[in-house]
Image (cartoon, rainbow, N blue to C red):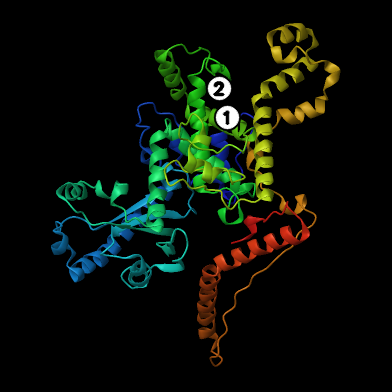
Amino acid sequence: MQFSGQLKSKIITPRTSLVETYKILFGSQLINENDLEDSHESERSQISSIHSNSSQNEREKAVSQLQLKIEPFFISLSKQKDLYDKYNINSNVETFKLTPFGSAMFGGYDKNSDIDVLLQSFDYLLSREEFFSKFAVYLRSEHVQANIQQEIPYAQIPIIKFEFMSKQFDLLYCSMLPPQNQTQKRQLEDDEFYQNMENVVNEKCNILSFRGWSNCHYIYKKIRDKECYSWCLKIIKTWAKQRGIYGFNFGYLNGISLIIMLAKADQLIFKDITSNNVSSEKILGLNESFVGDEDVIYSFSQQISKKLDVRVQETIFRFFEIFSNWDYKDPIFIQELPDWHLDQDLYFVASKEIFPVITPEKPYKCTTHQMTAGAKKQIVNELQRAQNLCTLIQKRDVIQNLIKQQYEPENNEELYERNSDLRHIRKESYDLDILNDFAQITWKELFNPYQFFNENGTFVQIEVLTEVYSDKQPLSQGKKGKALASRVKVAQTLHHEYKGLYESRFKLFQSFLQLHLGIDDIQIFADCID
C-alpha cells in the first residue's frame, strides 16, 4: 500500500491520533472524513453504517451486479434439471446464495482488497465439477464478462479467482443438500437454510468452504465494539503489510489470522475489565474498580462512550502488548475453554504448529499452518517493535516532563512529587537529546515500510518474466500499438495465472536451503511479489 500523495502535505505531530495519522497516510478516499466524529446516537452494531465511503459502495455494487448476472444461469439450470418438480421447491425461492465474508464483514478492507464470496447452491443443481466447468464458462461469457485469473479445483478449499467490475473476487463454492422436509423448505423460504451446517453436503471441501463464512460470522457476533474493531483491523492489516509480514502463501499473517488475533485481544480486554486482579486504569484508562455486574456494565459503557480515536488507540496498545508477550506454545483461540489440552481436536491441530491461530468452529483449522521458523521470528520481532513504540507513545508525557524539569529546575521538587514515574530517575541518568527525539515520536513510525535491503546484506533475487510471442507478419504502425497492448494484456493474464506455480517453487527453494544448508532463518520478502 502506498502513501497518498494528495495528503502528504498534512503534518503529523506527536499529538496526532492514530486514526487521524492513518487517514493522512493512506488516503481520504478510503474512509469518509465524517467517520472520525464520534456520534453516540449512531447504531454501532451495524458495520455498514460506518462505511459510507465510495470504496464500500463500489464493492457492494460489484457484489450486487455479480448476483444479478449469475441469476439467469441458475434459473436455466433449474429448468434443465427439473429441480423444482423433483424436490417440490417453490419456484420463487432462490436456488443459490452469494455471501461476502472475510475482512469485508468486519470493515477491515482497503480499495485494493479482494472480495471473498461464498457461493452456495444445491448439489444436484451444480456439482463441484460443474462449478469449474459450466459455471466458470458462464463467468467468462458475454453475460458476465469476468476475467478469470486462476482456477484451483484440487486445493483443500477449491476456488475461482477472477476480476469483475475492476474488483478482485475470490469465489468459493459450497454444495448444499436439497430440502428433505417441510421444516427445511420453510427455512429455505426464510433464508435460514443456507446458514445451517446440517444442510451442507458432507465433503471436506464443502465443509471448509462453509466454515470460512461461518467462522467469520461467529467472530462477528462476539465483537462488542464493532466500530472500534473495524478501524483496528484496518490499522493492523496495514501495519502487517508495511512491515513485510502479511502473506499466507509465504508463511506470514493473513486476513483471517489477524481477525482472530484482534478478536482475542478484544476478548481479553473485556475479561480484564471484569477482573478485580487487574487495574482497570491500566487496561482502559478508567478510574473505577469493578465490583459486581452492574459496575462492569457501567465501566464498559463508559469505555464505549469515549471518542472513537481514543478507543482505537487503547485497543491497539493492548493488541501489541498481548501478542508481543504471548507464549506461542498456546493457541490463539477465542472459544472459552478451561484447558485447551483437554479438547482432543484442538490439541491435534494446535500442538504441531509454531504459531497456532485457530478458527473457533469445528473442524478446527490453523490459519497459519504454512508459517516457517524464519517467518515467526520476523513476526515476533515486529510485534515487539510495535509494542516498544506504543510504550514510548504512552510514556510521552513522562518524557516531556523530564525535558521540562531540565529547563525549569525551580519546579523539580513539585514535578517529582506529582509524577511517580520520575521519582527514581536521576538527572545524570538520561541524555536530553535522546529524550527530545523520543518526545517527537508519532504514530507514523508504526507504518514505516520495512527496509528489506537495508536489514539483509545477503539475499537471492529471483525475477520471473512472462512474454508472448507472435508468428504473424509485421504490422503497420497503427496496428502495431494495438497488437502490443493486446500482447501485454495476455502476458499479464498468464503471469497472474501461473503465480501459484511461481510461489510454490519459491517455497520449495526455501525448503531446499533449510534442509541442505541448515539455514533456518530464511525470509521471503513478499512485498516484491505482485
SS for callout 2: helix
Task: Look at mark 2 in the image and give the residue it sits on.
Answer: 283
Q: Residue furthest bottom?
A: 473
Residue 52 visible in the shown view: no
Please indicate whether residue 141 sits to the left or right of residue 25 in the image: left
Image coords of residue 125 (percent x, y): 25, 64
Q: Nearer the viewer, residue 336 or 246?
A: 336
The disc placed on residue 416 is: none
**Label 1 environment density (alpha carbons within 10 Å; few <14, some 14–19, many ≥20):** many
State the image quarter where residue 105 is shown: top left
Task: Look at mark 1 in the image and give the residue it sits on.
Answer: 318
- Residue drawn at the location 33% of the way across and 71% of the way down: 134
State the image quarter where residue 147 is shown: bottom left
Residue 24 visible in the shown view: yes
Q: Are marks 2 and 1 in contact (CB under 8 Å)?
A: yes
Image coords of residue 312 (percent x, y): 52, 31
